[in-house]
Image: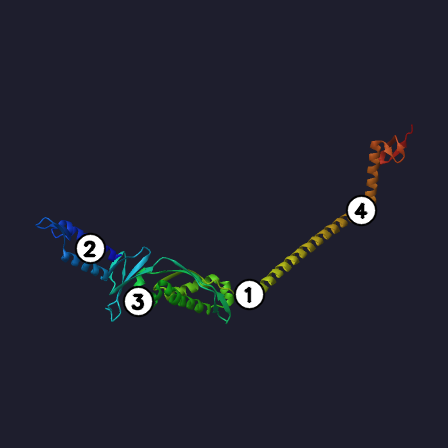
Amino acid sequence: MFTFILILLLFAIILLFHFSTRFKVFEWRVYENGNKYLHVNYKLMVLTVLAFIAILVQPYDLVRINAGAVGLKESLIGDKRGIGSVKLVSGFQIYNKFFERVYEIETDQKNVHYETLGVIVKGGFSCKIKPTFNYKVKPENADQLFIELRQTFKQGGLKAVETTWLETAILGGVNDVSNRFAVDSIFNHREAFEQQISLEVNKRVGKYFEVTQLRTNILPPESLQKSIEGKTKAIQEAEEFEYRAKRAVAENKEKVARAQGDYEAALLEAKTKEALSQPKMLELYRAETERVWAQKGVSPYGNNNTFISGKNDNGFMLNLRN
């Protein structure tokens, strides 16, 4: 791109020189005999060709650092004990292709999914994990990242760093933290487990990267999974048995309450019959019956009876027949 711009600039200069001075590149002139001929300014032509060749082989180029990325300009001369210096740049950059290189490192969030791997947890159990996480480069330390991982970066850019150095650090952190947790503790306190992994990972790569949303997606070993399923089934059966026991107790209480009620009702009925069977109660009941019969004019002896009362409540009944 830079070469193309220089070529356009060269032709613009030639045209300007041609039309604004008396030294024309091409010019029609007239001999003394009146004939015309084309005069060529060979000096200017040679200079133009040489300038064109110089532009083609010139070592400079122009690049633009995109938004969401940081630029690195590397010096190939080796001014730091034989190691080329690296500095952060941005925007448009003109550099010498013979002695400099310009790289671009993206600083936006990237998502990574690793394939299923095995880790050993405390106690010697093997678990399967499939880590996922987001990461981004810290722009202020991008030059230090490049200096430390120069060869890796030159081979494949940031992707090469992600699949080598970063992957080793991530999996190393996961393995080390896993060795501190017992297998049942991992699944009972998964949030704390993954938080410890995130802290360990950022401790290892935090100088150059910021790792977030790390999830191990860990699975229990097959033997533990069967044990967990058996334990869950036992708990469910125990809960069901407890429910049945409570239900049986409730039903028994209901039966006892019903029997108690029946007993108390029978007892009350017996007491009532016993009370009514007393002589005084029978005499009172007989007198009340006779009174009612007298009011209605009926008696065991027939209708139209007359009840006559005397002294000392000694009365007698007259049967008046028609």
C-alpha separation, residue under disc 2 versus residue under disc 1: 76 Å
Q: Nearer the viewer, residue 45 or 85?
A: 45
Kindly identify which residue carries mark 4: 273
Tag 3, which secondary structure? helix
Residue 8 visible, this orientation: yes
Residue 147: mark: 3
Q: Residue furthest front?
A: 33
Drawn side of residue 279 relative to residue 130, left or right? right
Tag 2, which secondary structure? helix
- Disc 2 marks which amino acid? Leu
C-alpha separation, residue under disc 3 versus residue under disc 1: 47 Å
Which x, y percent locates residue 164?
A: 39, 67
Please tell me which of labels 4 and 1 falls first in the chain: 1
Looking at the figure, which quarter contains the N terminus? bottom left
**Which of labels 4 and 1 is toward the front?**
1
C-alpha separation, residue under disc 4 versus residue under disc 3: 112 Å
Using the rendered view, name the quadrant where residue 300 is placed.
Answer: top right
Kindly identify which residue carries mark 2: 10
Residue 225: mark: 1
Please tell me which of labels 2 and 1 falls first in the chain: 2
**Which of labels 3 and 1 is toward the front?**
3
Please tell me which of labels 4 and 3 falls first in the chain: 3
